[in-house]
Amino acid sequence: MDKLNISRSGDKLTREDVIEKIKEYLKRLKNKDNLESVRADFVKEFKEVDASEIMLAEQRLLKEGTPLEEVQKLCDVHSALFHGKTTEERILNAEKAANQSVKEKRMAATKKLISISGHPLYTFTRENEKIEQLVERCMGVANDGNIEKELLTNLRQIAIHYAKKGDLLYPHLKVKYDISGPSDVMWTVDDEIRDEITKLYNADEQDNEWKERFKAVLIRIKEMIYKEANILFPNCALNFTETEWYDIYIDSKDYEKCLDVENVIWEEAEKAYITKKKKIVEDRKVKEDEIVMAGGTMTVEQLAAMLNTIPLEITFVDIENINRYFNEGPKVFKRPEMAIGREVFSCHPPKVEKQVRRIIEEFKSGNMDKVPVWMEKNGRTMLVTYMAVRNEKKDYLGTVELVQDMEFVKEHFKL
């Protein structure tokens, strides 16, 4: 019989030898030998055993006449004998150690970034501290009486925190690092929490059902804070590069303050941004030529300036569903630079993603050319128009999204 490759304390043994020796140890336990004495002898002879070898030794005891009940009783005793010595246990323990090591590495990386003043995780964490304080306050008030409108108004600012996550963290984790769990699960929960707070805010009365719903959403908010600290932030910390954090920092400056948490200046990111912009300008100077079109010619500089001047938020998505262009300037619907080159669907929460897919599919099939959507955003009336972009042959080239603030119409027509 072949010699075993498994390392033993002494000479290499055949599988048959190993099974027989295990059987001897089991017999000693059966004869009520002292467990610690038997275990000491076992450890001297073996570094590890295979679980199948133990099973075969038990089967042989049964064949030799040991009653099943006695072998079953031995199981509890011999588990102590073999504990930590089976190959399977060693593998499992190694996996646990590896998982623990990864977890510790993630948490250490997260803690380090949170300590950097101005870093996105520094700001996200400060926001969560404020959110948690507000939640605790709301829970205390909810048990005593009605919730003041001011508290509910403050609670609605959670939407700013969630919007930043949805625009800057979830899509990048999913697209760049193939970590889709947060975007598939947490993003949906964010939307549900935000929508529930809005419904509670707009409710006519705070009856018992309202208070139960309010307490329930507060618990969900606390759970989300925990998930961010222990799942989302550590995954980002372990994967995102320094350059990517710089970009996230710059994009985050477009958002309003959440619960008065200031966007502290991150000097390293500011310097990196200036360097990046200089390079973009230099590259444009080298490559810039006139763009010749049927309606005339323009330079890249002229075209970019014109598109930035038009009072619309403009987004162009190409035929492959990739974000190719956002015009510059302040926006109601945020468009982080990091989303350029990313699939448009990844930039939307799951429930909106389905609508966007349907619209683009209709455009591609030629069934539709335009979809207008009226909505309220930050107390203002907005018109979002999706339009199919086609060439003179009517071939589909992409989709353009135009966002327009329509409050001026009310003023013009005295509505």
Image (cartoon, grey):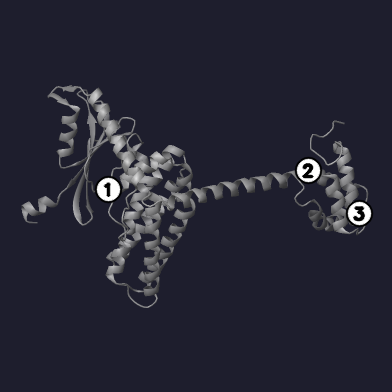
The answer to whether residue 76 shows anywhere in this view is yes
Q: Decide if residue 8 is on the left or right side of residue 157.
A: right
Crowding near the residue tagged with mark 1, few <14, some 14–19, many ≥20 C-alpha atoms within 10 Å: some
Query: Can you identify the residue that label 3 sits on?
Result: 28
Label 1 residue SS: loop
Q: Which mark is residue 254?
A: 1
First along the sequence among labels 1 and 2? 2
Do labels 3 and 2 touch, CB within 8 Å? no
Q: Quadrant of residue 336?
A: top left
Three-letter code for the amino acid on which mark 1 is drawn: Asp
Three-letter code for the amino acid on which mark 3 is drawn: Arg
The answer to whether residue 213 shows anywhere in this view is no
Q: Residue at x 79, y 34 (%)?
A: 5
Crowding near the residue tagged with mark 2, few <14, some 14–19, many ≥20 C-alpha atoms within 10 Å: some
Q: Decide if residue 20 is on the left or right side of residue 207.
A: right
| Image location of residue 316, percent across then percent down | 26, 35
Label 2 residue SS: loop
